[in-house]
Amino acid sequence: MICCKECLDLLSDYLDGELDSQATADLDEHFQDCPPCIAFLNTFKTSTHLCRETLRQVDIPEVVQKKMKEFIDQQKQKNS
Ligand SMILES: [Zn+2]
């Protein structure tokens, strides 16, 4: 089982379909029992707003919070 950090590092490749089948399976498995990463995935996909409802309901690991913040900051810079 991969950890959140690995999961998030692979996320953009995952969405681009650039991961091999093993890595894709690892991510799919991680998403099944990690709501914070699912929320991040959704945020990443839409690039518009955080899934606040989801985020309120779960404890977010620090690594996910940090990555999410970085991502949002990047988006803000792109859009400004
Ligand atoms: Zn996770």
Image: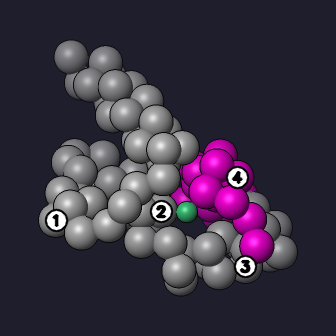
Q: Nearer the viewer, mark 2 or mark 3?
A: 2
- The residue where tag 3 is placed is 25
Residues at marks 2 and 3 touching, judged by CB atoms closer than 8 Å:
no
Q: Residue at x 37, y 61 (%)?
A: 59
Cβ of mark 3 under 8 Å from ligand 1: the answer is no
Give the image's coloring scheme: one colour
- The residue where tag 1 is placed is 53
Locate the N terminus and report the quarter of the image it occupies: bottom right
Q: Residue 31 is drawn in which quadrant?
A: bottom right
Q: CA distance from mark 3 to mark 4?
A: 13 Å
- The amino acid pointed to by label 4 is Glu
In this rendering, would 65 be left or right of 4?
left
- The amino acid pointed to by label 2 is Cys
- The residue where tag 4 is placed is 6
Q: Which residues are magenta?
A: 1-18
Query: In this orientation, which residue lies closer to the viewer: 40 or 66?
Result: 66
Q: Residue at x 43, y 30 (%)?
A: 70
Q: Residue at x 42, y 43 (%)?
A: 65
Q: CA distance from mark 1 to mark 4?
A: 24 Å
